[in-house]
Amino acid sequence: MRRLLLACILVFLSTPSWAGIRYVGGMVNGFAGKTSSTTVTFALTNGMGNVPEGGDLVIVSYFVGGTTDLTLTITNGSAVAYSYEADLYQDDTYDSNMRVGWRFMPSTPETTFILSQTFSTANAGRYTVHVFRGVDTGSPMDVAATTWGFAGNRSVNPPSILPTTDGSWIYVTGGAASAVGGTYTASYLSDFRAGTTADNVDAQIGSGYVMWTSGTYDPAPFSGGGTTTVDDSWTSVTAALRPATYASNIVPTSQRVGNVANATSLALAMPSSVTANNHVVVGCATWWGTDTNSLAAGDLTKTAGTSTIGSVTVDSQLSNGASPNIVEATVFSVPITGTGTLTLTVADDVADSFTCVAQEYSGMDATTRVQGQNTGSGTSTTPATGTVAGTGEALFFGAHVNAAGGAITLTQGADFDGLYEMTDGTTFTSGGFEERIVTTDTTDAADWTLSSSLMWTAAMAVYQDTTGGEPPPTCPSIALMGIGCR
C-alpha cells in the first residue's frame, strides 16, 4: 500500500502544467548585396504587440544568395550572437546560405538586431522575424531542429519533425537562390512571411508556424516562388518550440483569437479545438454613436463548432461618454462543457465598432470563478481600473477602449502581458487587452499608457483557480509528501 501511494504521489508531482505559446508578431524584409552589416529595428505586426517584451523568444531566419559558402551572423546591438539553430549551405550556380538563430529577450527588451554583410554587392539578402511568448526558457527547442536542402531547383520542401511535448508549436523556414526570384506561398502556415530581393543573385525566403497536434509533422512544399531552373538551390529548417511550464493552476492555452469589425456582430473563431472543463474569457472594446444599450450576456453566443458551452456571464463592464461618442469595455467568460471547435459571436441590435479577443484558460474554478472586478473611466493618457485584491492563484484580465480618431501607441501595464490590441482608431475601435497570472495574494489594477490624452474606459475581472484561490502547500521533502501537496 505504501509503495502504491508513493508511486501515485511521484506521478502527480512529475506531471507539469504546460502554458500556451502565444504569437507576438513578425516581419520580413530584404536588401541588395552589401559589404557592411544591417541593423534591423523591431516593428512587428499580425500578433500581440509591435515589439518583443522581456522573456519573448525571437527567431530570425537570414538568407543570402551567393556563389560561395558564406559565414552569416545574427547578433544583438552589443555584438552578442543569437543561438544558432542552423547554418546551411547548398552549392549550385546560385548558392544558398541560410542562418537561423534565436534569442530570449532580456528584462529590458532589445529594440534591434544586426545581420552580417552579404559579402558582395552582387549577393541579395532576405530575412524574416517571428516572435513567440510562453516558450520554455530552459529548453526552447522541444527536439533537435531538422534541416534539408537541394541543388538544381528552388522547390523548398521543409523536413518533417516529431515533437514530444503537448502544446508544442512548429516553426518552418526556407529560402532559395536564383537569377530571378519569386514569392513563396504556404497557406498551411500561420503568419507566413515571404518575399524576394533582386541582385545578381536573388534571395527569396518564406517562414511561418503551425500548432502541433500529434505524430510526425511533415510540412508541405512551398508553392509559388517563380520559375525554377537547374542553376537554383534551396535550404530549409523545421523546429519545434516547447511551451513553458506554469507554476499556477490557471494556464493560458494556445487557443487565442482577436478580431475587429464595424458591423452589428463580430465572430471569434478559436484556431483549434477547445477543451472540456476549460473556460474562454472574452474582452470587448466597443464604440457606438447612438445606441445606449450595454452588451449583455445574451449578446455573446456560440454560432459554430462542435464544442458545447455553458452559460455566458458578464464579469466586468463600464461605458463612458455620450451620444454620438460612447465607448464601453466588457469582460465576459464562458465555461467549455464539451471538447470541440468553437466560434463565439458578439452581436448588438445596431451597427457598432468592435475590437474583441478570446482566450482559453485551463484551471479556472467552475463554480465560483470570479473573485472580484473593478472598472475605471476618464480622459487622460493613463487608462486604469480600480484595484482588486486577488486571493492565492488568480487571473487578472483587463479590457480597455479609447475614443481615438487616428493612430496611437498603446502600452500595457508593466505587470501584465498584452493579448491583443487595435491602435488605428481611424478605421476601427481603438483598445487593448491584457492578462496577469499570479500564484500568491496580489492586489493590482489593469492599466495602460496612451500616446495622447483621450476619453477612455477600462474593465477588469479577477478569476480564481480550481483550488478556490488558495495554492496547495509545497513539499520540502519526500518525507512530507501527501495528498494535496506538490
Image (spheres, helix red, strand yellow):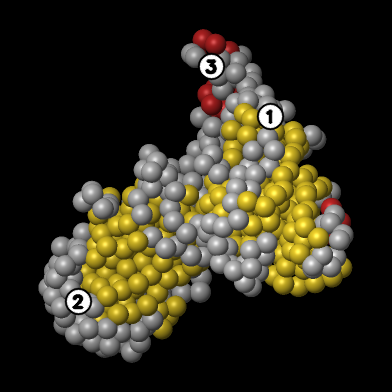
Q: Find residue 414 and report its horizontal and vertical position in percent.
A: 52, 42
Q: Is residue 82 above or below residue 92?
A: above
Q: Nearer the viewer, mark 1 or mark 3?
A: 1
> The residue tagged with tag 1: helix, strand or loop?
strand
Say which amino acid is labelled 1: Ala
Distance from disc 2 to disc 1, alpha carbons, whole Å, reads 57 Å
Identify the amino acid type marked 2. Gly
Q: Tag on residue 33?
A: 2
Query: Viewed as shown, does residue 287 lie left or right of 151?
Result: right
Q: If you read the primary sequence from the N terminus, does the residue marked by circle 1 or circle 3 appear first?
A: 1
Circle 2 SS class: loop
Q: Position of residue 358 (x, y in %)?
A: 67, 55
> In this rendering, would 375 be left or right of 122?
right
Disc number placed over residue 274 in the picture, else none:
none
Residue tagged by mark 1? 389
Identify the disc placed on residue 475.
3
Residue found at the far top of this picture: 479
Q: Quadrant of residue 435?
A: top right
Q: Is residue 116 left or right of residue 332?
A: left
Q: Secondary structure at mark 3?
A: loop
Q: Residues within 10 Å of mark 3 (few under 14, many from 20)?
A: few
